[in-house]
Image (cartoon, helix red, strand yellow):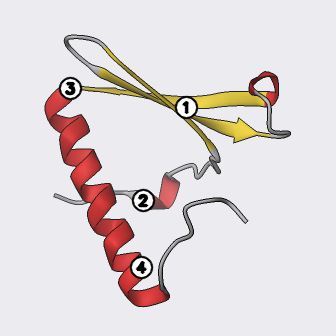
Amino acid sequence: MTHDREHLEARYSNHFEIGQNAFEFLFDFGQDYGGSDTTSQIHTRIVTSPFFAKYFADLLWDAVHRYEEQNGRIPDEEP
């Protein structure tokens, strides 16, 4: 499988919300401009099945683990 990443739009996100129901998970990504929920703007929603949500969680954990092996522990709180 080939991926055309040349035309992907990159968006910064420092605000995340996750919801779920019996059939799907909803991942909302956005930006928080001031620390309160009223200043957060959601710009992307990803909807996926429970299977792929779990797969995503495993991939993300593996990526964080590799990052920490190479760069040191990520702090639990934002500096």
Secondary structure category for the residue under label 3: loop
> What amino acid does circle 3 point to?
Ser
- How far is the residue under mark 2 from the one under mark 1? 18 Å
Which badge, 3 or 4, is on the more N-terminal residue? 3
- Residue that label 4 marks: 68
- Residue that label 2 marks: 5
- How far is the residue under mark 1 from the one under mark 3? 17 Å
Secondary structure category for the residue under label 1: strand
Which badge, 2 or 4, is on the more N-terminal residue? 2
Query: Residue 75 at x, y = what percent?
Result: 57, 69
Residue sitting at the far right: 34
> What amino acid does circle 2 point to?
Arg
- Would you say the residues marked 4 and 1 are in contact, meaning their CB atoms lie under 8 Å apart? no
Q: Residue at x 20, y 13 (%)?
A: 23
- How far is the residue under mark 4 from the one under mark 1? 27 Å
Relative to 45, 51 lies left or right:
left
- Residue that label 3 marks: 49
> What amino acid does circle 1 point to?
Thr
- How far is the residue under mark 3 from the one under mark 2? 23 Å
Which badge, 4 or 1, is on the more N-terminal residue? 1
Q: Nearer the viewer, residue 13 or 9?
A: 13
- Residue that label 1 marks: 44
